[in-house]
Amino acid sequence: MLPARRALALGVLLAAGGARAVLGAPLLTLTPCEIEHPLRLTVIAAECGVLRVPENPAAPGGRQIGLHIARVAAISRRKQPDPLFVLAGGPGAAASGFYASVAPAFARIQRDRDIVLLDQRGTGGSNALDCPEPADRATPTSLSEISAATAACLQALAARAEVAYYTTSLAVQDLERVRAALGLGRINLYGASYGTRVALHYLRRFPANTRSVILDGVVPVSRPMGAATALDAESALEDILRRCADDAACRARFGDPRADYRAVRAELAGGRTVAVSVGDPLSGSPRRLAFTDESLASVLRLTSYAAEYAALLPLLLHAGARQDYAPLAAQYLMVERSYAEALATGMHNSVACAEDVPLFAQLHIDRARLAATYLGTRQLEGLEAVCRLWPRGPVDEDLRAPLRSEVPALLLSGSDDPATPPQYAHEAARSFAQHLDVVLEGFGHGQLTAPCVDRIMAQFIARASVAALDASCVRAARPLGFFTSLNGPPP
């Protein structure tokens, strides 16, 4: 769950209608459109439309917002009647932009089923709560800077949004309206990261309308996110560096990368900075920046999200331990930009400040233990600073209540996930009488594009059952080898 600045917009046709679950006739008209990859690499043919809903359901005559929907049609002319709804993470990512970046992973499912993409309220084309970027593009770091940026965001959004009404409890009602407006019966759900919270709460509210759920990078209902982020991220990094130390080629090139990690952290401790000149990863133009422990924390956390990026970490840390910070600085510029452009900060804040941060006071948070990690307490304190200003929206009383379901569930985790480690999926699995809990060794956050996972998901959706579901292929899945040079892993 990451704060960020912008979300991808999707142009669609305005269509009227409210949800009438008792009628099977569609109330929402879709017309041809294209979904564009976030980096403009590809476009995907789809049908799009907009469903108008009250921003505040308790005031149906008040401001209306448009929910932007895209449907990617099944290839088969004899398609199955139950589509797959894709729920993006963040919170703050748009389903349309997320899908466009990972569409091949759903190709097997799309053979027989439509894929439906609802940009959750506050993201993408659904009145995205994008916060203005600082003029110098610098990420606010001090608590006073974070507070000032939060106040500026609220002021910028005030003319078109009452930001309290963008919580999960309202999002699942939107999802049900869209299901009904499309004239659908039961649906299947795929949720990634925060999207698993949405899937679980929809399942709680509308069990009869849910055929199956895939939870990828699971956020269990019992856990507020953010309180343990620093500890989870540190544990994942330790696992990644340990894998390098246990790998012959990686160890021969770098020795024990944990020593490099400690050396770089010591160099940047106490607020010390390193002046770095580096070419911008996108434009190539020269950039000068002061690399700090906060810059390092950003690189370590965001680079460890995906196995293909985590493969770079021993190389980056080895260079930094030898006073060459240019590779770390270049990676910092790249990951900050890519993650910032994927998420709507305001929507993230609306969810976190209503659903997660208020629960921190009920937890025993060992801040001294957090301070020993590379993230320290800054992420926790930053969230608390934001939420002192951000309005709290409606949260269903049972959002955190234990869930018990007969709907079949496939749960996916990576052993080196810095955000939602496997134990989170193990906790969530207790909610399901029928479930399969799959962990991929050496992989990070989100298993959608990992080897053979697309096949497992397609088989699960086809059957809506975990009985005899063969997931043994994941035992042969291996993350990308560690880079021993900028040319890549050894042959």
Image (tube, helix red, strand yellow):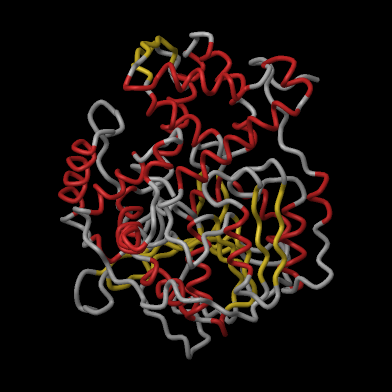
- Asked whether the viewer can see residue 18, the reply is yes
Kindly identify the residue that appears in the image at 20 percent across and 78 percent down: 61
x and y, in percent, of residue 390 in the image: 22, 55
Image check: 361 left or right of 410? left
Q: 1 above or below 397?
A: above
Q: Residue furthest bottom?
A: 22
Kindly identify the residue that appears in the image at 38 percent across and 60 percent down: 363
Q: 317 above or below 92?
A: above
- Asked whether the viewer can see residue 124, the reply is no
| Viewer-proximal residue among 478 and 33 | 478
Image check: 310 left or right of 345? right
| Viewer-proximal residue among 22 and 17 | 22
x and y, in percent, of residue 107 in the image: 70, 54
Kindly identify the residue that appears in the image at 51 percent across and 84 percent down: 25
x and y, in percent, of residue 39 in the image: 50, 36
Q: Quadrant of the C terminus?
A: top right
Q: 240 above or below 119?
A: above
Q: Classify residue 427 by image quadrant.
A: bottom right
